[in-house]
Image: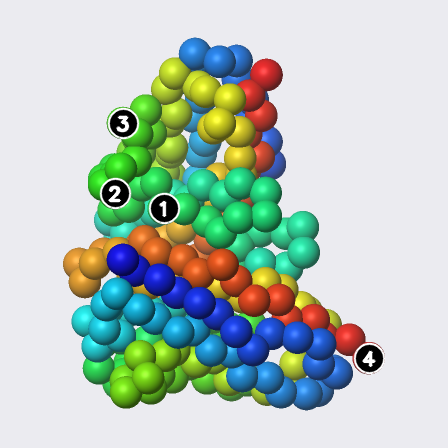
């Protein structure tokens, strides 16, 4: 159950778009459509922003979008806003019927 | 409104045990998979365990398998995590979370977390 691989940090200016990658294996990301993304602000509980690769829960801005190709998934945030500054985590279902998170990516809005 | 309230965290000595509770309201535990996720201070999220709608299926991360047990009390609509043989590596904020829906594995609702500190 090795953690999925994410970049430690990314940054962008307000209004720009950024993409966060999430690399797994053929036993998790590559095998299942169950990739989720979570946003976490300091001291707060995580918030689900993308599920099943590219679906958004009710109330989540359409500036957030997800995709997957092979063993890698991506989260794109368009039209960056200051309140997007947070930590982002990907998660995947695995062949062992468990779940695994990525190491997390800190997004800085310059 | 869905609400999840964790309790039971605190300071415990290495090798000790602790039981966390997660009181659920606004829905029935018999209708959704439930999860525990933890986060060590300053570190990332780590999935710990889940239990299915009828309580018959449970899954665990390798790091806790054999030491932690997830369960629930339907009458109290409460989820539990029994933690045994605790070590310093188990120090973390523990979140309970409800799956968004039956047809996905994503956790759509989260509690505020309860802090477990393992130290002598």
- Label 2: chain letter: A
Q: Residue A50, position in %: x, y?
A: 31, 41
Viewer-nearest residue: B19 or B26: B26
SS at mark 3? loop
Q: CA distance from mark 2 to mark 3?
A: 10 Å
Left or right placement of residue B3 versus residue B46 in this view: left
Is residue A48 visible to the viewer in this orientation of the structure?
yes
Pointer 2: residues within 10 angstroms few (<14), some, or many (20+)? few
Residue at the image position 30 percent from the left and 35 percent from the top: A60
Viewer-nearest residue: B53 or B65: B53
Q: CA distance from mark 4 to mark 1?
A: 36 Å
Q: Is residue B42 above or below residue B101?
A: above
Left or right placement of residue A91 versus residue B11 in this view: left
Mark 4 and mark 2 residues within 8 Å of each other at the beta carbon: no
Mark 4 and mark 1 residues within 8 Å of each other at the beta carbon: no
Q: Which residue is mark 3?
A: A62
Pointer 4: residues within 10 angstroms few (<14), some, or many (20+)? few
Q: Earlier in the sequence, mark 2 or mark 3?
A: 2
Q: Which residue is mark 4?
A: B120
User: Which label sits on residue A48?
Assistant: 1
Q: Earlier in the sequence, mark 1 or mark 2?
A: 1
Mark 1 and mark 2 residues within 8 Å of each other at the beta carbon: yes
- Label 3: chain letter: A
Q: CA distance from mark 4 to mark 2?
A: 43 Å
Q: Which quadrant: the C terminus of chain B?
A: bottom right
């Amino acid at each position: 159950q090795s953690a999925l691989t994410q970049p430690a940090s990314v940054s962008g200016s307000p209004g720009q778009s950024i993409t966060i990658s999430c690399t797994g294996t053929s036993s998790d990301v590559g095998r299942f459509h169950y990739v989720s993304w979570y946003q976490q602000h300091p001291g707060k509980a995580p918030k689900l922003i993308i599920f099943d690769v590219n679906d958004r829960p009710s109330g989540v801005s359409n500036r957030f979008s997800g995709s997957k190709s092979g063993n890698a998934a991506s989260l794109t945030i368009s039209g960056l806003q200051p309140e997007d500054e947070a930590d982002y985590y990907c998660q995947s279902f695995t062949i062992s019927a468990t779940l695994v998170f990525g190491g997390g990516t800190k997004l800085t809005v310059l | 409104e869905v609400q999840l309230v964790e309790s039971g965290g605190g300071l415990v000595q290495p090798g000790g045990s602790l039981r966390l509770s997660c009181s659920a309201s606004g829905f029935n535990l018999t209708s959704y998979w439930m999860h525990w996720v933890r986060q060590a201070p300053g570190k990332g999220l780590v999935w710990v365990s889940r239990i299915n709608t009828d309580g018959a299926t449970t899954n665990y991360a390798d790091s806790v398998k054999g030491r932690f047990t997830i369960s629930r009390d339907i009458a109290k609509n409460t989820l539990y995590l029994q933690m045994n043989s605790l070590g310093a590596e188990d120090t973390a904020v523990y979140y309970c979370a409800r799956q968004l829906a039956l047809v996905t594995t994503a956790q759509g609702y989260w509690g505020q977390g309860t802090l477990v500190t393992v130290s002598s």
